[in-house]
Image (tube, helix red, strand yellow):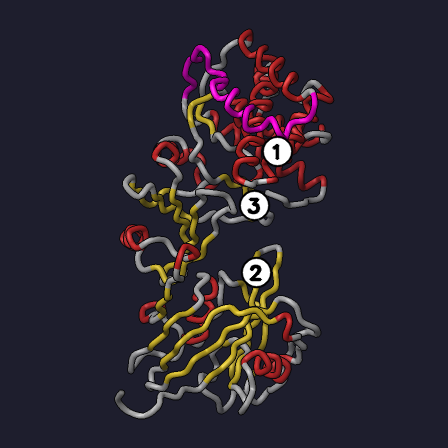
Amino acid sequence: MSGGRHTEPLDVHLVAVRDTEAGPEVLLSRRAGDVYATGLWHLPSGHLDPGEDVVTALVRETGEETGVLVYPADVCAAVTVHHRSPGGGTRVGFFFEVRHWHGSPRVMEPDRCDAIGWFSLDALPEPMVAYCRAGLDAYRAGARIALHFQESGDPIAYDPAVDRLRLLPHAGPCSTTPEDAVRDFVERAVGRVTGWTDVSWARKGSQVWRARDAEDGVWFVKIHQSDRFHQREVTAFRSWVPCLGPMAPRLMAADASLRAVVITAVPGRSLHGAVHPPEQERRIFHRIGQLAATIHRSAPALPPLPDSMPLEKLERHLDGARACLEPGDEAFIRATTKEAAGLPALERVPTHGDFQRRNLRWEKSTGTVYVIDFERSERAPAVRDFVRLSDAWHGRPDLHEALMTGYGRPLSLAEEEHLVVLSVLDAVSGIQYGAAHGDPELVERGRRTLARLRATDRL
């Protein structure tokens, strides 16, 4: 053992987060007066008093600096950062997330702070203390522990050119960063990544990360579940997706051996689970109809294929769904799908394949609808893309009218008949998958679709 016992100051940092329609915001204050890093933005923070634990210190410092009351039970661990300043001093900072408090933040120590305010996590102010920025970047990346060892001569203020943040990966299967090969692939495509956030759906096989580069650019990295999904998505990006222009992401890089893609980000918030006023809903559905028309007309239609109705998996899906079906459901399913043999085949166009609210984003300020996720894209009848939207317009003829007005034409009688059969097949498939993978949302959606179709005998 060399030298004496290693001792370092400990400090605590408040990551107060509030959710807004535009996204999450964080509370920052600007240092002022005869203090370290004057003029720079920073999280409310401070040192521990003798004998004080870190949670008690955070509650105290929050009250002293912002006038806000935080209860210890509302303090959540965010990330711990081991920091070295440009002058060589080291310290350990504990960053805590707080989403519930009492009171409104205000400047409590005007000799040390001259401003306080809320800022988007995606648009942090400048100049900002590099140490604070490192903690926030590590927090956004989902890291538990991070190193931020600055070099002599580095600026106190954050500078992406000398970003010293190093995220330590989690142990075991809970890691929030992709494997080394994927990280190397991404950084070759877009440059150094300073933050990773796992944004995968809570479903088996879903692997999606939001990556942030050293200049605050945002990218999405996706690992496909199979070679088939990877090839479909890459083919879509390289063929018809560019016809959508800014309404869809762009493909930056693809690696078939990793089944990985890097794509650009698009604005807006997901329509999944969102609630809007009726008039706004009608505008959204009109835009969705226009988007669907753009997709389907992005390439000339191809002639129909015989036996194009996907019936080959029906028996297997029924076996897996049967325990979740209501009395009479199976007879209805078989009677409906039997009618498929007599339906006329439809011409094939580019389709999204999973055209539902989960994969649609709405930017209110511009009134634009964006679409993502093309791994199920293929040439198919256009009506395929309305299957997972039909549940959304049930009981809302105004939404159906807005959608079709945006689409530019109503569905033909043959398309309506195909839509019924395809909706039944999709419901059975969803119930089977949801039951096998513990996904109650898919099971409920499928049961709801069958009940609706049986009750109305139409869409």
Amino acid, disc 1: His
Mark 3 nearby-residue class (10 Å; few <14, some 14–19, many ≥20)? some
Q: Bounds of the magenta span? A: 300-327
Pick out the residue farthest to the top: 342
Q: Which residue is mark 1?
A: 286
In percent of width and height, residue 77 lies at: 53, 70
Q: Looking at the image, is mark 2 or mark 1 earlier in the sequence? A: 2
User: What whole-number distance in Å separates the C-alpha atoms at marks 1 and 3?
Assistant: 16 Å
Q: Residue at left 65%, top 16%?
A: 331
In this picture, is 258 found above or below 56?
Answer: above
Q: Which residue is mark 3?
A: 270
Q: Is residue 126 left or right of residue 51?
A: left
Q: Secondary structure at mark 2?
A: strand
- Residue in the picture at 52% in, 20% down: 315
Quarter of the figure with the N terminus: bottom left
Quarter of the rendering containing residue 236: top left
Task: Categorize mark 1 by other alpha carbons within 10 Å: few (<14), some (14-19), many (20+).
Answer: many
- State which quadrant residue 419 falls in: top right
On whether residue 352 falls in the magenta region, the answer is no
Residue 47 seen in the figure: yes
**What amino acid does circle 3 point to?**
Ser
Amino acid beneath label 2: Pro
Q: In this rendering, is residue 359 above or below 98?
A: above
Q: Earlier in the sequence, mark 1 or mark 3?
A: 3
Q: Identify the element where label 3 is drawn.
A: strand
* Residue located beneath label 2 in the image: 24
Looking at marks 3 and 2 on the same chain, the residue that comes earlier in the sequence is marked by 2
**Closer to viewer: mark 1 or mark 3:** 3
Distance Cα–Cα, label 3 vs label 2: 14 Å
